[in-house]
Image (cartoon, rainbow, N blue to C red):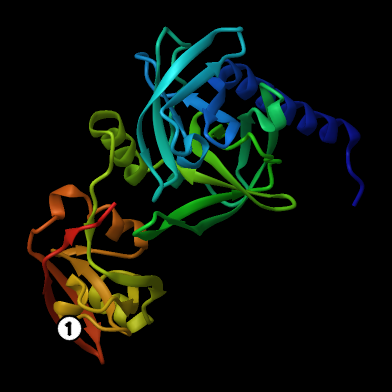
Amino acid sequence: MAIDPDAEQGALDAYSAIVTSVAAQLTPRVAALRIRARGGESGGSAVVLTGEGHLVTNSHVVGEADGGSAEFADGTVARFDVIGRDPLSDLAVVRTDRAVPTPPEYGEADSLLVGSLVVAVGNPLGLAGTVTAGVVSALGRSMPARTRTAARLIEDVIQTDAALNPGNSGGALADSRGRVVGISTAVAGIGLGLAVPINDTTRRIIHALMHDGRVRRAYLGLVSTPAPLTPVQAERYGQPRALRVVETVENSPAALSGLRAGDLVLAVDGVPLGDAQSLQKRLFADAIGQRMEVTVLRNGALVDAVALPTELAD
């Protein structure tokens, strides 16, 4: 089938217009960070979060440092202090000592589809204000994160073929309307970049970092993976998916409640679950020490287990 050259050029022009528009919106609002620590100087990116000088970046960008400097596209250089970091989500919040550009609009990563156009803005390899574009190449990825005493999977990570390089970390991943839907975090291989999604869970984490400097989490002690229900089960229980328990940690709240590998977790406190995020967003500070009723499907029968989550150690 012959391709109409005019139509092809029109599509390229439209694509270029979108990328140009997003770049114009975001480039002034993404800063190049410089961090001095014992091991020397490192860098990364950060996105303006509030009108009060808060920026959001990756936890691994700031590391153990207390502060550094942020430079914007207009030449403004500000000192910043790290006010909160959370290695288990790879997010951190810093605050500058002077006025910074107004924040961009933040969107919802849940609205993305595989194939959606995305634009990455950051400062790779020390090259400030670099813009690359691509598509969402996969959704629902998981990425391990850990501290000295705990480990967690960052769920619903966005995978993109927009070029990401060292220094992009902490920068913005935006949709075609310029809304920030992710914070670039890692290069997974040639042509593969990953971003922490902006969703209900990460908004709660960012809020805790801004106000408390840390994220308190409840601990159940189970490892789970999303699992589809059979058509009969889906119709009977009114949901297409559950969480399959892969493992329970010995002497953990999950193990003490009677949960075991192979259980299909349908609901917590009567609220249906279908993915790891739906469970993780229930495991914040307000769940510590509170009775949690977990409904599971075991050998074809419904079983209710009662767990008392403890606080996850830092």
Label 1 crowd bin: few (<14), some (14–19), many (20+), radius 10 Å: few
Q: Is residue 223 above or below residue 86?
A: below
Residue at far bottom of view: 299
Q: Image point 33% across, 65% down: which residue? A: 274
Q: Which quadrant of the figure has residue 312?
A: bottom left
Looking at the image, the residue that sits furthest to the front is 38
Visible in this render: residue 177? no
Quarter residue 102 falls in: top left
* Number of dots carrying numbers: 1
Q: Camera-side residue: 166 or 108?
A: 166
Q: Nearer the viewer, residue 180 or 56?
A: 56
Report the amino acid beneath label 1.
Leu
Q: Locate residue 29, reporting x and y percent.
A: 53, 18
Query: Residue 166 vs residue 8: left or right?
Result: left
Q: Is residue 51 above or below residue 268?
A: above
In the picture, measured across the screen, residue 192 lies left or right of residue 265, that is right
- Residue at 40% across, 11% down: 97
Q: Secondary structure at mark 1?
A: strand
Indicate the position of residue 223 as horizontal and vertical percent values: 35, 71
